[in-house]
């Protein structure tokens, strides 16, 4: 019985490309997410949303410290998740970083912005129970959109492997900072 490698013609580009596609599919099928990634990411986003809403509404130094603490919680969970993924699988996927962890996908961005807007409005109105509901809903929606992306990636890794470029992420970060500053100045 001949092995698969013996059947491939090294001079035939289509057979080499076919072998590469099969290897990519095997790699994608064998990747594992860190245990508890989705709940941890959802909780970190919920904490970040709630603390940001409080900090923006409070407009004090203590409020700013709470908002920054929420960002630190999110960044800590994100860094740990990416580290664990790399340790478990031995690879890095740009799409995982930008789409799942940083939420640059369309669905996670819409969920985050909706929850952020609702939580911030509720904080300005001092409806703290509604801030908590909006933050938790945003965290759950963010985690579900991350799960959805992961399933899409596993089905078609070529279409979903690329993440947002560092330039796009930098522009989005600057716009987010300008938006927060505008909320602090206007509010």
Image (cartoon, rainbow, N blue to C red):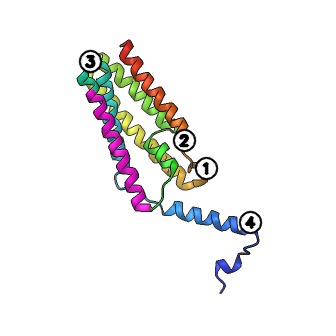
Mark with earlier residue (1, 3)? 3
Mark with earlier residue (1, 2)? 1
Front of the two marks 4 and 2: 2
Q: Is residue 53 visible?
A: yes
Residue nearest the observer in this picture, 6 or 71: 71
- The residue pinned by badge 4 equals 14
- Classify mark 3: helix, strand or loop: loop
Spatial separation of the CA atoms under disc 2 and disc 3: 36 Å
- Mark 1 nearby-residue class (10 Å; few <14, some 14–19, many ≥20): few
Mark with earlier residue (2, 3)? 3
Report the residue that reaches farthest toward the right.
12
Spatial separation of the CA atoms under disc 1 and disc 4: 20 Å
- The residue pinned by badge 1 equals 159
Q: Quadrant of residue 133?
A: top left
- Classify mark 4: helix, strand or loop: helix
- Classify mark 2: helix, strand or loop: loop
Q: Is residue 54 magenta?
A: no
Mark with earlier residue (1, 4)? 4
User: Could you say where residue 35 lies in the image, as x and y percent from the top left?
Assistant: 35, 56
Spatial separation of the CA atoms under disc 4 and disc 2: 30 Å
- The residue pinned by badge 3 equals 126
Q: Which quadrant of the rendered structure holds the C terminus?
A: top left
Identify the residue at image location x=52%, y=40%: 166
- The residue pinned by badge 2 equals 164
Q: Is 152 drawn above or below residue 20 in the view shown? A: above
Majority secondary structure in the magenta region: helix
User: Could you say where residue 53 lies in the image, as x and y percent from the top left?
Assistant: 32, 25
Front of the two marks 1 and 2: 2
Front of the two marks 2 and 3: 2
Residue nearest the observer in this picture, 85 or 110: 85
Mark with earlier residue (4, 2)? 4
């Amino acid at each position: 019985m001949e092995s698969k490698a013996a059947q491939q013609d090294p001079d035939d580009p289509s057979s080499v490309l076919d072998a590469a596609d099969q290897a990519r599919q095997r790699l994608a099928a064998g990747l594992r997410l860190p245990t508890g990634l989705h709940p941890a990411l959802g909780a970190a986003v919920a904490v970040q949303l709630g603390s940001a809403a409080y900090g923006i509404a409070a407009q004090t130094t203590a409020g700013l410290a709470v908002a920054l603490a929420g960002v630190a919680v999110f960044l800590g969970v994100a860094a740990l998740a990416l580290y664990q993924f790399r340790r478990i699988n031995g690879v890095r996927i740009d799409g995982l970083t930008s789409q799942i962890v940083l939420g640059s996908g369309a669905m996670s961005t819409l969920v985050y912005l909706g929850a952020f807007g609702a939580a911030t409005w509720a904080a300005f109105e001092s409806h703290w129970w509604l801030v908590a509901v909006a933050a938790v809903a945003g965290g759950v929606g963010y985690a579900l959109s991350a799960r959805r992306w992961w399933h899409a990636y596993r089905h078609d890794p070529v279409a979903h492997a690329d993440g947002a470029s560092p330039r796009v992420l930098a522009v989005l970060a600057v716009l987010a900072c300008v938006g927060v500053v505008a909320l602090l100045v206007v509010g």
